[in-house]
Amino acid sequence: MAPTLILIRHAEALHNLTKDYQIHDPELTENGHAQVQELRENLIKHPVAQNAGLIVTSPMIRTMQTAMGALDWLIERGVKIEADAGWQENSAKPCDTGMPGAAGALAPKFPKVDFSSLDPVYPDKRSPAGSHYFCTRNAILNRGQASLRRLRDRPEKVIIVVSHSGFLRLGVTGCFYLNADYRIFDFEEEEPLGGEDGMTPQIRLRQWEETKEKGGGMGKSWKDMVELGSGLPDEMPN
């Protein structure tokens, strides 16, 4: 049976506050750290989160800070936390581009995060080698499918993912996520590819009514839905 997913957006980071998207791989703000504690208090009481058997995080600083702060109680229990480039943010702006040599550079700061399976091409989003991570409609939809497929085939009953609003919304779920909010999903039956461009998602998720009606597990997020891939460019932006 496929696992239940808890998909979390990171807490407020410096670029969210300042709107300066030239900050390279920004850290959480003071308010962001407070949001992490609020999220922690919510999740630690949630029976689904209590059953988590794996934590997956984008390798970016703000997501790992969120994961380590909000889910420390699971990590202390022995739940593995691993960095996965598939869950990084969409754009190639500095704020959405990770640190070169992330495993070596960040492992000392995040010693409990397993970087062993991190794609060695990370954080490349511009060269042909990094084409899987391009900020284009096809690349992001394909990355969303690949990321979901890896989790669907895992044995854990519940998996928690800490990622980013753009990728979660446009590449995975069609839902909005405000900072430090989350939604819970189950996998639906796999559907064949379709649509004129052949990019209709093959793997679909069904959101729990609990987080759908409330506007996220924290009740902070907009309830509107968008089409996966909507508004994304066909060609890689400069």
Image: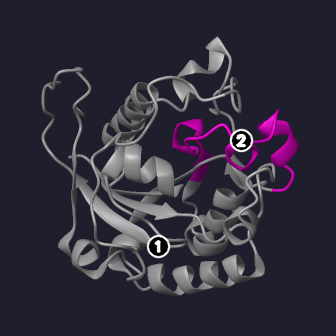
Q: Position of residue 195 (x, y in %)?
A: 15, 26
Residue at 43% across, 37% down: 232
Q: Earlier in the sequence, mark 2 or mark 1?
A: 2
Q: Which mark is residue 154?
A: none
Colour scheme employed for the rendering of this structure: one colour
Q: Is residue 148 above or below residue 122?
A: below
Residue at 67% across, 58% down: 64
Q: Which element type, helix, strand or loop, lies under badge 2?
A: loop
According to the picture, the residue beneath numbered tag 2 turns out to be 97
Magenta region: 81-109
Q: Amino acid at mark 2?
A: Thr
> Is 181 positioned to the left or the right of 59 in the image?
left
Q: Position of residue 159 (x, y in %)?
A: 41, 55
Residue at 29% across, 54% down: 226
> Is 46 positioned to the left or the right of 192 in the image?
right
The quadrant in which residue 196 appears is top left
